[in-house]
Amino acid sequence: MEVKVLDINGKETGRTVTLSDSVFAIEPNKHAVYLDVKQYLANQRQGTHKAKERAEVTGSTRKIKKQKGTGTARAGSVKNPLFKGGGTVFGPRPRSYSFKLNKGLKRLARKSALALKAKESNLIVVENFEFEAPSTKNFINVLKALGLENKKSLFVLGDTNKNVYLSSRNLKGSNVVTTSELNTYNVLHSNSLVLLEGALEGIEENLSK
């Protein structure tokens, strides 16, 4: 599929690029996308939750009343889960929520996410650009020129560009990554995907294996 190349002023350069059909024109696999996003979100969880159980609650171990003859249920400890201040039954414990996915499935999920953006016409190809120094104002001007100032956007660079990254860091709705950092969640979490020309080769090389 062919896509027009824009400059940072949002104007057509008169050039087009051909995107690989094996990456950007496949039939999206929604289940693969679901699993990859689920893994990404699970990996963000710290898993440090903890509730004290009966054996961990501070309190006397003395039997609080006799076993029989009280007319109520038997009770042996103030740490009983039925009492206020008692331990928690089967409470949360520290754990890892991460799980493994095959590389092939994760690759399919990323291709599916890119194909969805292309299918929805939310994919823009921009010629390579740089800033002489970090400037949020310059980055905002790029967003306005591309019509993305009020949308969540993901810029994908071919190589690390510190000035462009620092220029976007203060903007809540924009994210800048390199081809090696591209993941399914970031692609789907953005309204528009902006690919720099220098990133296309890296993306297709990584996902065409």
Image (cartoon, rainbow, N blue to C red):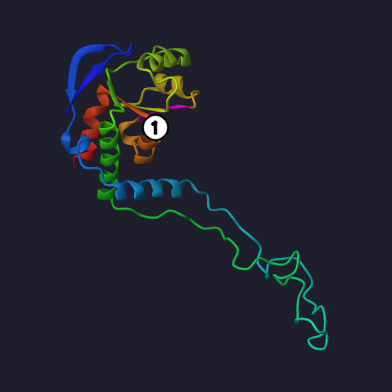
Q: Which residue is mark 1?
A: 190
Q: Nearer the viewer, residue 186 or 43?
A: 186
| 123 drawn magenta | no
Secondary structure character of the magenta stretch overall = strand
In the image, residue 121 lies at what x, y percent?
28, 28
In the image, residue 95 lies at what x, y percent?
51, 58
Residue 201 picture quarter? top left
Residue 56 picture quarter? bottom right
Q: Nearer the viewer, residue 140 or 202?
A: 140
Residue extending farthest to the bottom is 69
Q: Quadrant of the C terminus?
A: top left
Examine the rendered structure and indicate whether residue 110 appears above or below residue 193. below
Q: Residue at x 27, y 41 (%)?
A: 112
Q: Secondary structure at mark 1?
A: loop
**Count of numbered circles in the view:** 1
Q: 46 left or right of 152?
A: right
Q: Amino acid at mark 1?
A: Ser
| 175 drawn magenta | yes
In the image, residue 70 lies at what x, y percent?
83, 84
Q: Which residues are magenta?
A: 173-177
In the image, residue 4 lies at what x, y percent?
22, 19
Other-residue count near label 1 (Cα within 10 Å), few / some / many at <14 / 14–19 / ≥20: some
Q: Quadrant of the N terminus?
A: top left
Q: Residue at x 20, y 36 (%)?
A: 25
Examine the rendered structure and indicate whether residue 69 appears above or below residue 43. below
Q: Residue at x 36, y 37 (%)?
A: 188
